[in-house]
Image: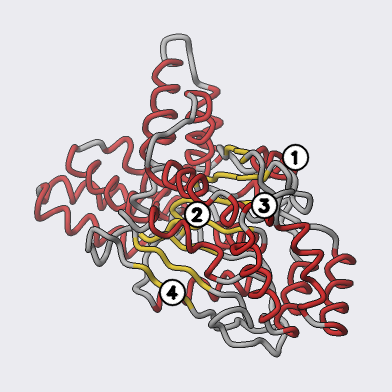
Amino acid sequence: MTEPILRCLVEPAATGERNGPLIVLGPSLGTTTALWDDTVGALSAQHRVLRFDLPGHGISQAATEPFTVAELAASVVAAVDAAGGGPFHYAGISLGGAIGLELALRYPDRVLSLAVICSGAKIGTADGWLERAAQIRASGTPAQVRGSSERWFAPGFLDRNPSAGSRALEILMEVDDESYALACEALAGFDVTDAVRGIRSRTLCVAGENDAPTPPALLAELADAIPGARQVTIPGVAHLPAYERPDEVAALLLEHIGGTDPRTAADTYAAGMVVRRAVLGDAHVDAATAAITPETADFQDFITRYAWGEIWTRPGLDRRTRSFLTIASLVTGGHEQELAMHVRAALTNGLTRAEISEAILHTAIYAGVPAANSALGIARDTFARLDAAG
């Protein structure tokens, strides 16, 4: 298996901000960056937008060796790093959505938010994908035009917008046959059904009302499995809503990335509990929950919804950075009872012991040496207890 090199297009933010927030857009099998042409204008008003092509599609070189969906995800991270790096928002359709799930699972600190569009934790059957790969090798991508036109577009779209539909199908015929077949084989081996329960990125699952390959029920099932995710169905579209309803897709993505938050208090509590468990550990949260009394119940609800469900789930900072800030704030405020808990949490979030010590040393200059001295003692004791525990 190999990690393909994916080539991309980068649209700067209309604001001119060179280091502004980044949106990465992933295509469906058989499509190119052109799939997103009519959404980029709205998305790039405030964001940089990176679109990539799959192997043998558009501007990406053809593949000659097998690859997995996870390796495509690694290639996306490499493309982002080549464009400046850092965390990003991600949206992908079909195979692009599958790549997004792998990104959220394997690079959780990079994915600020995730939109999975007309996709799933498992798409179709392995036998079906292997059969299609064999068909492509025998007859080429032009043989897929009729089937793709039926899967991709809702009834009547090609009559209403023949130019968009014909261009999409022309692009399909230009895709490298072997690269398409290898992508089919990657989808044959893709199944993260059990793993998606571990996704911690804020997630939106979007279905097309008339989508047969990945129907709304599949997206609803995915949203149920991912903690805190929500599901939306776009009426009157099939498998490629970015072609059929680009304005609606762009609006959904902008709302999800940073506009209004449609989550209920229960949604926020559920998302907060997921993050709280991920950062502090099940044992700590279970103990805190077991200790709830009528007098403390409202406070526990408050910190779960607002601290963990509102602040820790915001896309602007990754969890490593939030741990740095939390440690510095606790040292500054002299909140030693909370510090040991957040030293452990910082280790969970990927900080090293040396980085934690460095954060406390840095805080000494601005918060005072006595506070930092006490904090280093707490960190030392916490490290010692963790070592003794195994």
Mark 3 or mark 4, earlier in chain: 4
Instruction: Say above or below: 330 vs 97.
Output: above
In what element is the residue under mark 4?
Answer: strand
Tell me whether the residue at label 2 lies in contact with that at label 4, contact meaning CB atoms closer than 8 angstroms. no
On the image, the x and y values in percent for residue 19 come to 27, 65
Q: Is residue 287 left or right of residue 349?
A: right
Mark 2 or mark 4, earlier in chain: 4
Which residue is identified by label 3?
157
Which residue is identified by label 1?
217
Closer to us: 235 or 82: 235
Which residue is identified by label 4?
9
Disc 2 from disc 3: Cα separation? 65 Å
Q: Residues within 10 Å of mark 1 (few under 14, many from 20)?
A: few
**Nearer the viewer's eye, disc 3 or disc 4?**
3
Coloring applied to the structure? secondary structure
Disc 2 from disc 1: Cα separation? 48 Å
Q: Mark 3 is on which residue type?
A: Phe
In what element is the residue under mark 2?
Answer: helix
On the image, the x and y values in percent for residue 272 come to 47, 34
Mark 2 or mark 1, earlier in chain: 1
Disc 3 from disc 1: Cα separation? 23 Å
Q: Mark 4 is on which residue type?
A: Leu
**Nearer the viewer's eye, disc 1 or disc 4?**
4
